Amino acid sequence: MNGSVKTIGAFGLALATGIAGYAVAGWASEAPVNTVRVIKVDSKRYEFIPNELTVKKGETVDIELTTHDVVMGFAVPDITRERTNILPGQVAHVRFTATKVGTFPFLCDVFCGSGHEDMDGTITVVE
Ligand SMILES: [Cu+2]
């Protein structure tokens, strides 16, 4: 009698441990460690859509860029030296991890026509 109670107790403990382990594994897979968040930004003469982005300090983001009409550029000089050309029909990327809080301008750095100078946006980095 006593033995069967111990057996059930051990089984219950194993089951509980398994459930706890599963819960931890499930939580871990959603943790933002070593993940890259993709932010899609489309463009056309003479705007980026969206043109206001928010990222977290320390978060690695991949700006996935497309253009509807002509060759554009994308640069965020206050955050990263990485920049890219955006070619029609292709997807371009700029990946960075912001290290300081604030609001920083991004811009098209390839002359794309008469409204090129106004083609910009902001990236706000929050804690
Ligand atoms: Cu431009």
Image (cartoon, grey):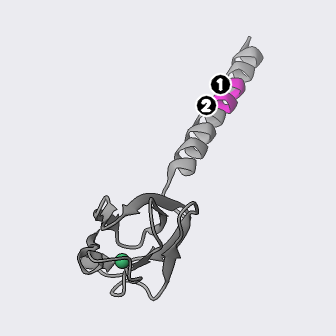
| Picture residue at 43% right of the left edge, 59% below the top | 39
The x and y percentages for residue 20 are 58, 38
- Residue 8, magenta (yes or no): no
Q: In which quarter of the view is residue 50 placed?
A: bottom left
Taking 59 as reference, is 16 left or right? right
- Residue 13, magenta (yes or no): yes
Which residue, as the protein is rendered here, is positioned at the far front?
Answer: 114
Ligand 1's image quarter is bottom left
Q: What element carries label 2?
A: helix
| Picture residue at 58% right of the left edge, 63% below the top | 90
Which residue is under mark 2? 16
Q: Residue 80 carries which label?
A: none
Q: What element carries label 1?
A: helix
> The residue under label 2 is which amino acid type?
Ala
Taking 68 as reference, is 92 left or right? right
Q: Give the range drawn in magenta.
A: 10-15
The x and y percentages for residue 34 are 56, 65
Which residue is under mark 1? 12
> The residue under label 1 is which amino acid type?
Gly
Q: Is the magenta stretch mostly helix, strand or loop?
A: helix
Measure how far apart labels 2 and 1 are at the Cα level: 6 Å
Q: In which quarter of the view is residue 122 placed?
A: bottom left
